[in-house]
Each structure stands twice: as structure tokens, then as C-alpha cells.
Amino acid sequence: MTSSPQASPRLRVSVVVAVYNPGAGFDELLASLDGQSLGADAFEVILCDDGSDEATRARLAAAARTRANVRVLTLARTGWPGTPRNHGIDAAEGEYVFFADQDDRFPPEALERMCDYADRHRSDVVIGRVLGIGRDIPRAIFARDIPHAHLDVDPLLELLTPHKLFRVAFLRAHGIRFPDGRVRLEDHLFVVAAYFAASVISVLASSPCYYWVKHRGSASSSRIDPVIYFPHLLAVLDLVEANTDPGEVRDRLLRHWYRGKILQRLEGRRVVRYPPEYLAGFLDVVTPIARDRFGPGVEAGLALPFRVRSALLRGGRRDDLIRFCAWEGAVTCRAEVVEIRSTRSGRLRMTLRATVERDGTDAFLFDSPAGPEHHRYLRLPEDIAPDLLPGPVLDATHDLRRDRVEVGIRGAGTGIDLRRATRPTAPGAVTVVLDPVEIFGAHEPAERVALRAHVRRAGWAFTVPLRVAARPPGDLLRGAGCVVEVGPAGDLVLRRDRTPGGWLRQQARLPRAARTLPHRLLPRWARRVGRRLLSRAPKR
């Protein structure tokens, strides 16, 4: 009997990377692709070289020579990633395409899990969980898996970077491409067009899929030129309006860009650092945009500080706006630990106090006029003429209900970003419980993590180091599988407990299946039993 030739495996995904004279991070990207659980014969890597120098061309050629699934497209210099990515779409032979940056990296099972998820749900777009290295990632979009997400309901606009999985046939059928040339917000134009055209958009939040690394000098960290930048924003707004009808859905979508691209740049702590000529030029450009493109429906859904900025901006009250920005720019936040201890269940329980002040007193005061609804209104300084603002603009009732304090975990050089939140049980005092297993066991390994406080008060948001009032000698606490230390600036740091009696060392005695099972998936009773057994394990 003659055996039939074996069918070649399906090429599932093309990873497209726009490359220009990369640094050491490029080697980490290639290493993460080499380590993918998806076989090398099931995916390809297309390196779109945007006119790099001779040394880089040799480096790319070596990467392709030693890897059968890597190929290089040598292109003329454009200075922007859009055109190289378009060449990648044209050259892609996989069923899906993923756009990666040259200094980022992938977890080992990322490509396989995203492709399987897209196959299962017939997705045109899959938004895999992104973890930030040195940058904060929006959290609501990755709160849960969403097999069939909808732009008018789910927070898909929170992350508009192109680091997503797209079905190649879908992109080609709809002619979805990046704008060529030096176009700001090119990612928004591409991703939003894909969102409107897609039949199925899926969010894969339960598995990390991409590490997005922040480097100094990136374009996103530089101050924008309003004259150049905002015409590109108008192109995004045109795209939204062309695909929506006037009303609540359009207002909610437009609110995303109004808040993030205009009003956030008028936040007091930023405005006080602007040179006067820059601030004047910025306001000259954005004032007519705010009046013409963002109406009352957009403004009404904003948080309190954004509503005030919007009302003053759209009303042409430039001097009042500048005074308001100076007022809120002097507001400070401080978060201090009052008590910290190790619980019997192996967790850390800490009580902390957060204060938001200006000139040593409570920063935000509220008036509560008599009435059945018990609304509370922000009291602004007299020189801002608050009497000229409509009542709904200063109504803080809804914003105050959302006050909260979170303790954030940020590991240097890792993608750890866990938060535990609570509402104040007394003025400014909260209690937060942290689990070292989640911190050190369920994410990319880290030896030390710093603690930060995320404080929300009346719609204002602050992120500050979590500190102690007075630095004690030695370790603050040893237990619960970690050591709590006080850094040079008085901030709190958690370090792995590497001593023989440390929880993480005892964890090695568990069966392999129990060690690898994601801790957050265990029921609460199983976690308690596991900790009890571990606490009884003999010391080495």
C-alpha cells in the first residue's frame, strides 16, 4: 500500500513586526516567539524593515537565516509604522495576523490561545490580555472573557493599540489598512474601523497574551504639537460619526476621545507645567473642537473634574479655566499604612489612611442644600465664579458614591498589576488584604514588588507610593510568604521570602498539578485547606 503524502500544517497566524534599528528588546521579542507553544511550522514572523541601517539589516538577515518561519521585508524609510504594517498585511500567509512592536514580547502560550479562541468563536478580532511593563494598562476591558463583545456596550475603546489578533481575510475584504505616512492616532483609525466592520469581536482576558514595554523617549511620552495632532483626532471623530447615529451611543464613544485627548491634557498638575505660550496655543486649537464636536450629551457623562474643565472650555472662559487648573494642581494626595499584620490564612492585612489635601486642609468641600434628594455640590474658590456654572456641572453626588482606595502591586520589569480595592469604612481609613500567592505565584516571576495607592475622590484620581509614617528599624514584617520592607523613600516593598520556612519554599512540596493550577481558580475553601496544610509542613 502506498502512503499518501502528509498534508502540511495550517499556517495559523502571521506576526507582523515593524522594525527600525531595534535595541536589545528585539532579542527578547525573538526569544519569546521561539518559545511559543504553537509550533514554529504553524506561524510565521514577518519583519518589516523600515529602512534600517546596515547593522540592523545584517541582524535581521541572521534572524531569518536561523529560523525557518522568519522572513524579512526590506522597505524604504517612512518613519512611521503604518506603511510597514500594511506591507505585512499584504504578505501575510496565516489565517490571522498579530501586530507586535519590536521591543515587546509574548508569554509562551499566547499565540496558541488567541488562535484557539478565535477559531472557537469565529472572531474577526481578538483582544488578548495585555500586561504593561513600566506602563499602566486599562483594567475594565480585561475584567472578564467576552466571546462576543459589542462596541456600544463593552469598554473596547479603553485599549486601541494594534496589539491584537485580526482575521486576515476580514481585513482584506473590508480594505482595512493603516494610514500611510506620519499620521498620529494611526492605531485608532485602524482599530476603530475594524471594530465597526467586524462581525465578532472577542476579549480574551483570562490568559496573558502580550507584554507591552514602555521605553524612554517613546512618541506617546512626548508633548504633542496641537496644530499637527488635532487634525488627526478629527479624522477619528469623523470615522465614529460616519458609523453611528446621533444619540447616547455616539456620545459615549466620542466621550472617550474628549476625555483622553483634550480634557486629560488640561488636568491641573499638567497645566501648571505648560509654558504660557504652549498653553495659549493649545487652547486656541481645542476650544473650537470642544464646541463643535462635543455637545452637552458628551459632557453630561463625564466625571466631575472633567465636567468643570469642559464647561469652562466650551464656554470660552479661559481665565477661569486656568485658575481652576492652578487650584486643582495644588491638590496633593498621601497614603500611609497605619497597621500591617500577617493573618492565620497566610495573607497580609493592612489598614491605611488616604488624605487629599490643599494647603494642609481637605481639598474638596461640598455644599448640601436642603431638599429630598440630598445632592452635594462642589464648592469652588470665589475667583473662579462658580455661580456661572450650571448646577449639574458641580453636582458631585454620583462621583462621591464611587470614592475608593486601591492598593496596587507593580513589579519592576514584570507584568504584575494586581489591585485590591475597598471603600472607606471611616473617614479616610481602609483595610486591604493581599495574598502573596497571587503576587508572586500567578504572574511572571518577580523578586520585589512596590506598593502603590490608587485613590479616587469625587472623580479625581491619584496614584501615589504607599508609605509608612515613620520608618522602623529592619524589616516591617516577615510572614505570609514574603518580607515587607520600607524603601529609601519610606515606600513599602514586598520581597519574596527565600528562607527555608518561607511559604513559597514550602510550596515546592505540593504535587506538581497543585503547584501549576492557577491560584485564583481555586474555590475559597480549597485555598484555606491548602494554606493550613502548608503551615503544618516541617521546616527544612
Image (tube, rainbow, N blue to C red):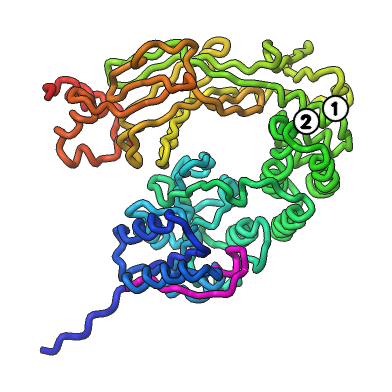
Q: Which structural element holds mark 2?
A: helix
Q: Amino acid at mark 1?
A: Leu
What's the residue at 45%, 53% (across, down)? Answer: 104
Specify few, some or many for label 1: CA neighbours under 10 Å numbering under 14, 14-19, or 20 or more.
some
186 over 265 or under it: above or below:
below
Residue 253 badge: none
Label 2 environment density (alpha carbons within 10 Å; few <14, some 14–19, many ≥20) = many
In the image as oriented, which residue stretches furthest toward the front?
A: 55
Identity, as a three-letter code, of the amino acid under mark 2: Val
The numbered disc on residue 308 is: 2
Q: Is residue 277 toward the left or the right of residue 164 in the image? A: right
From this view, report whether residue 262 is shown above or below residue 531: below
- Identify the residue at horizontal 48%, vertical 49% (top origin): 212
Residue picked out by circle 1: 389
Magenta region, residue range? 68-84
Instruction: Provide residue 493's location: percent of width, then percent of height.
Output: 40, 25
Image position of 346 with respect to 302: above or below: above
Is mark 1 in CB contact (under 8 Å) with mark 2? yes
- Residue 348 is covered by the magenta coloring: no
The reply to whether residue 241 is in sight is no
Question: Measured from the top left, where is residue 280 in percent x and y?
Answer: 84, 41
